[in-house]
């Protein structure tokens, strides 16, 4: 499914989609590969890639049938994603059959992680394993069962503090929404017993809190 050429090792980008790929043996020759796109195939597992651990920067595996077991099919021989990649910054596994993120905890160079439309359902398996990804800036987990939980984005932003975007939401906007919610709750419970002077002071403090949150949000987006 790849062209037979003596210069095959010079490829920096390769896209293979809708070709019914079942294995990736040919990638051994792609020693300079930086971007690999094998979306929309019939892959159920990931193996090989040992020749790309020092060069691969972007890996797109969306719209396949990859399971948690298939992600580490050859863990004993250290191939596939069980290896350490020194330059991998983008990993797309959207539209697969994954139920956990624990398999990504060693990929500490990741900056973007796409996991939309999988089977991730709880914080223990889906969020807390990401704590080690200190370079992660963007994560996409919409259309997973966990995304329906009220505080899933807030929890993500606490577990991975460097995040600037969760799905379509900027993290600064989450901070502002949280502050506004707390301010409104405080306002409802306290203003009924305040004097006019105390009420004015209270609203001034609310305005200062909002201003600080907006400043924090702006700094996060820079």
Image (cartoon, helix red, strand yellow):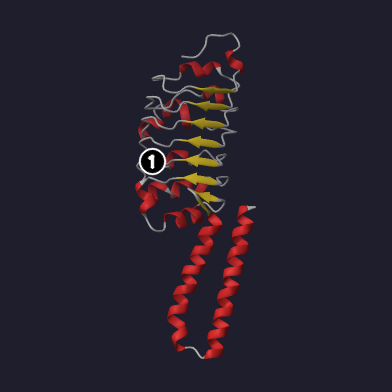
Q: Closer to the camera, 155 or 199?
A: 199
In the image, residue 16 above or below residue 149: above
In the image shown, does 217 or 76 lie closer to the viewer?
217
Residue 76 at least partly seen = yes
> Viewer-proximal residue, 101 or 151?
151
Q: Is residue 31 above or below residue 200?
A: above
- Residue occupying the point 43% across, 45% down: 141
**Whether residue 122 is visible:** no
Identity of the residue drawn at 52% across and 26% down? 36
**Is residue 104 depicted above or below 175 in this figure?**
above
Quarter-wise, where is residue 205 in the image?
bottom right
**Residue at 41%, 22% in the rendered image:** 18
Q: Write down the residue under mark 1.
A: 117
Q: Where is residue 103, by image quadrant?
A: top left
Residue 102 higher or lower than 72, as above or below: below
Which residue is depicted at the point 53% across and 90% down?
196
Residue 78 position, x and y percent, is 47, 27
Q: What x and y, as percent, mark residue 146?
A: 37, 50
Asked if residue 95 lies left or right of residue 137, the reply is left
Q: Residues within 10 Å of mark 1 (few under 14, many from 20)?
A: many
Query: Residue 84 placed where, x, y %?
Result: 53, 33
Q: How many marks?
A: 1
Q: Position of residue 15 (x, y in %)?
A: 51, 23
Give the SS element for disc 1.
loop
């Amino acid at each position: 499914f790849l062209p037979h050429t003596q210069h095959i090792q010079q490829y920096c980008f390769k896209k293979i989609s809708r070709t019914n790929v079942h294995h990736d043996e040919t990638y051994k020759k792609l020693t300079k590969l930086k971007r690999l796109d094998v979306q929309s195939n019939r892959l159920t597992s990931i193996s090989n890639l040992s020749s790309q651990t020092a060069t691969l920067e972007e890996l797109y595996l969306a719209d396949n049938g990859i399971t948690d077991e298939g992600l580490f099919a050859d863990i004993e021989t250290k191939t596939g994603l069980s290896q350490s990649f020194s330059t991998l910054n983008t990993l797309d596994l959207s539209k697969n059959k994954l139920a956990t993120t624990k398999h990504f905890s060693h990929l500490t160079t990741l900056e973007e992680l796409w996991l939309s439309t999988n089977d991730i359902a709880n914080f223990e398996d889906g969020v807390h394993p990401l704590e080690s990804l200190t370079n992660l800036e963007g994560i996409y987990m919409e259309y997973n069962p966990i995304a329906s939980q009220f505080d899933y984005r807030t929890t993500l932003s606490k577990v991975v503090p460097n995040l600037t975007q969760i799905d379509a939401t900027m993290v600064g906007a989450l901070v502002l929404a949280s502050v506004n919610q707390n301010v409104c709750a405080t306002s409802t419970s306290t203003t009924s017993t305040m004097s006019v002077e105390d009420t004015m002071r209270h609203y001034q403090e609310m305005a200062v809190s909002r201003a600080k949150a907006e400043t924090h949000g702006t700094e996060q987006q820079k």
